[in-house]
Amino acid sequence: MTQIIAALTQEYVLLASDRRLTYGEGPKKGQIYDDDTCKLVSLCGTTGIAYSGVGGNERPGIDT
């Protein structure tokens, strides 16, 4: 489960998320995949994007 928190004021915008990825299916479902993954993107300090959902794919030849 991803936790994304956003706050907006007249002066600032804050976007924060956790950094943990877990397996979503298969025999390792629920186990930690990576504990230090960035789920936020900042574009030139003007746009903030956070994601949840599939964060990786172990199948060869398929990019996420």
Image (cartoon, grey):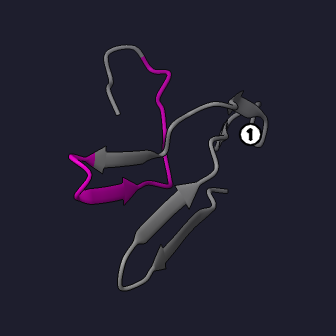
Residue 49 sits above or below residue 28 on the image: below
What residue is rendered at 77% in x and 43% in y? 30
What residue is rendered at 54% in x and 58% in y? 16
Query: Quadrant of the rendered structure where residue 8 is?
Result: bottom left
Residue 62 lies left or right of residue 32; in this view the side is left
What residue is rendered at 50% in x and 76% in y? 7
* Amino acid type, residue under disc 1 in the picture: Lys
Decide which of 29, 32 is in the foreground and name it: 32
Residue 28, image x, y percentages: 76, 31
Crowding at label 1, few (<14), some or many (≥20) Cα neighbours within 10 Å? Answer: few
Q: Residue furthest bottom?
A: 10
Residue 37, image x, y percentages: 56, 33
Is residue 27 magenta-colored? no
Residue position for label 1 = 29
Q: Residue furthest front?
A: 11
Q: Quadrant of the N terminus?
A: bottom right
What residue is rendered at 35% in x and 46% in y? 41
Q: Main secondary structure of the magenta part?
A: loop
Query: Quadrant of the rendered structure where residue 26 is?
Result: top right
Q: Quadrant of the C terminus?
A: top left
Decide which of 30, 4 is in the foreground and name it: 4
Label 1: state its secondary structure: loop
Residue 37 lies left or right of residue 1; in this view the side is left
Residue 5, image x, y percentages: 57, 68
Q: How many discs mark residues in the rendered view? A: 1
In magenta, the rendered stretch is 43-59
Is residue 48 magenta-colored? yes
Residue 18 lies left or right of residue 16; in this view the side is right
